[in-house]
Image (cartoon, coloured by chain):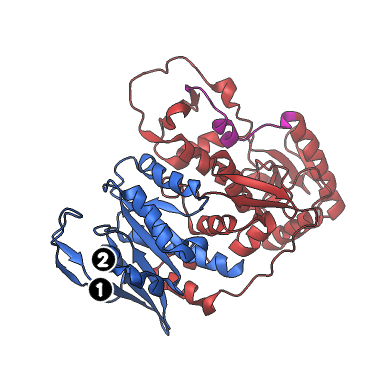
């Protein structure tokens, strides 16, 4: 079974864009017209999973973008099983962004317990240090040591840093 | 404490490095070999023409007469006992100058009040309360070069009044903590805390603020390691594939930037892990290479 990396997060956080930045194949996107503009003001939304691939010589790493709508939460534990890790994408402009972090930590306990979760906060603005503070505090309150980055997933280098962090964690988990 | 060499060939460098390891524990300080370099606490010079002429550390002339008063001499070819005598003499002299002289990173981390200083004619404005630093330099590297000079006494050099050209914006601006982080990473050997590499176990309660602070693949591995379980410096070196100075620098940086370092002594030194084969049959390494991630290129 190929290794997998998950991209999770609420609607509009950039999962589709992040996968597109690193996938070797055109990501299979399942976007339709967004009829819930109150939750997220974007014209389309993903209604199934985004899918991408990173092709290695004899192997493959599969990228899944898991839909953020709660009606798909039954898929979360199935997909998280055996994953290298997950990138949790958050949108700092959402008023409930900090709560989003907590909700996803609760939804993916196995990943967060083994540290296989990287938190990437988008739209953090010109002072990312300030913007990231509430997320770090939330993690500290739960005594969770997880990496938190400000990231613009339209930039491939930002996405690569997130994946590199997942890789570093996977290696250390294997050796400890 | 750092020792570097000037003019040694590969064999002599290897020999020096090996002899330092054998002498570990027989000197008060931990001496780390930095390779061929122009700056260290102790410089062993084999080629007189390349010897620096202005204070870059204590000079020891290997098999050649000292060129200045106060320089040391070292028998050549290198012998273990001669090296030990040299290190003990160097410790005596360096301790006389600065037994507990904190490095620049430590001094900046301890700064509580705003002020400014001038180094080599360049103004550096420090605002710890706002976590700001401004400087008349072109880059972070230039700033670090200024701040890393030996025996720098920041408090003595700090002015508390208004800086000259007050109000004029200086070209380099950064978070003060990001500068402390970068300085400390480079100070692992110099700011050698009395950290036993085997008996002292370190853990981090949070990840460093990578992205806002300098980040590199080896640092990611160290952060992943030390946030998972308490681990010694020696184990950190082994598992992350880094030298001791780099791991010490990382832990020092975490301490000074308040990332949440805790330490516990293990009475029985923890066994050093054997270097393991890459997990997942090298899948992660191949993934790195496929994505062009730099750690793959450096391994």
Relative to residue A127, is residue A19 depicted above or below?
below
Chain of the residue on which disc 1 is drawn:
A
Query: Which chain wears red?
Result: B
Q: Secondary structure at mark 2?
A: helix
Numbered circles on residues, count: 2
Q: Are marks 1 and 2 on the same chain?
A: yes
Query: Which chain wears blue?
Result: A
Relative to residue B223, is residue B85 depicted above or below?
above
* Residue B53 at x, y percent in the picture: 63, 36
Q: Which residue is mark 2?
A: A16
Q: Quadrant of the N terminus of chain B?
A: top right
* Residue A174 at x, y percent in the picture: 57, 70
Q: Which residue occupies 55% across, 40% down?
A: B258
Q: Which residues are magenta?
A: B97-116
Q: Nearer the viewer, residue B78 or B207?
A: B207
Tell me, yes or no, whether the two marked residues, 1 and 2, touch with CB atoms within 8 Å. Answer: yes
Q: Nearer the viewer, residue B69 or B161?
A: B161
Q: Which residue occupies 60% across, 26% down?
A: B153
| Crowd tier of the residue under label 1, counting other residues whose Cα lies within 10 Å: few below 14, some 14–19, many 20 or above | many
- B233 inside magenta stretch: no
Q: Is residue B177 left or right of residue B30?
A: left
- B98 inside magenta stretch: yes
Q: Which residue is mark 1?
A: A27
* Residue B263 at x, y percent in the picture: 67, 47
């Amino acid at each position: 079974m190929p290794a997998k990396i998950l991209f999770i997060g609420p609607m509009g956080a950039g999962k589709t864009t992040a996968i597109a930045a690193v996938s070797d194949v055109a990501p299979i996107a399942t976007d339709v017209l967004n009829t819930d503009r109150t939750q997220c003001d974007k014209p389309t939304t993903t209604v199934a999973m985004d899918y991408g691939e990173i092709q290695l010589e004899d192997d493959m790493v599969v990228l899944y973008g898991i839909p953020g709508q709660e009606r798909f939460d039954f898929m979360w534990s199935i997909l998280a099983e055996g994953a290298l890790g997950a990138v949790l994408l958050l949108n700092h402009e959402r008023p409930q962004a900090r709560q989003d972090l907590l909700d996803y930590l609760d939804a993916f306990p196995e990943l967060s317990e083994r540290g296989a979760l990287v938190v990437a906060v988008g739209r953090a603005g010109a002072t990312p240090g300030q913007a990231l503070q509430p997320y770090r505090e939330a993690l500290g309150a739960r005594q969770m040591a997880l990496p938190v980055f400000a990231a613009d997933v339209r930039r491939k280098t930002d996405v690569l840093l997130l994946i590199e962090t997942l890789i570093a964690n996977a290696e250390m988990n294997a050796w400890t | 404490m750092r020792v570097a060499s000037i003019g040694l060939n590969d064999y002599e460098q290897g020999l020096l490095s090996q002899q330092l390891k054998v002498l570990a524990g027989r000197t008060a300080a931990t001496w780390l070999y930095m390779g061929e370099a122009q700056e260290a606490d102790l410089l062993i010079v084999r080629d007189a023409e390349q010897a620096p002429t202005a204070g870059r550390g204590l000079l020891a002339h290997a098999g050649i007469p000292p060129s200045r008063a106060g320089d040391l001499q070292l028998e050549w070819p290198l012998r273990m006992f001669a090296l030990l005598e040299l290190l003990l003499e160097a410790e005596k002299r360096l301790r006389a100058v600065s037994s507990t002289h904190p490095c620049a990173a430590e001094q900046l981390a301890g700064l509580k009040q705003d002020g400014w200083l001038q180094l080599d004619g360049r103004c550096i404005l420090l605002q710890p309360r706002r976590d700001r630093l401004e400087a008349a330099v072109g880059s972070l590297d230039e700033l670090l070069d200024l701040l890393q000079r030996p025996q720098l006494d920041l408090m003595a050099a700090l002015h508390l009044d208004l800086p000259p050209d007050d109000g004029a914006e200086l070209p380099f601006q950064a978070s003060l903590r990001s500068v402390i982080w970068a300085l400390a990473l480079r100070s692992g050997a110099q700011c050698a805390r009395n950290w036993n590499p085997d008996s002292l176990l370190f853990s981090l309660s949070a990840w460093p603020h990578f992205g806002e602070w300098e980040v590199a693949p080896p640092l990611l591995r160290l952060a992943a390691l030390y946030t998972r379980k308490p681990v010694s410096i020696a184990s950190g070196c082994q598992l992350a594939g880094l030298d001791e100075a780099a791991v010490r620098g990382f832990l020092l940086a975490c301490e000074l930037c308040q990332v949440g370092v805790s330490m516990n002594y293990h009475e029985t030194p923890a066994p050093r892990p054997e270097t393991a084969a890459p997990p997942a049959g090298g899948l992660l390494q191949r993934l790195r290479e496929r994505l062009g991630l730099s750690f793959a290129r450096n391994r």
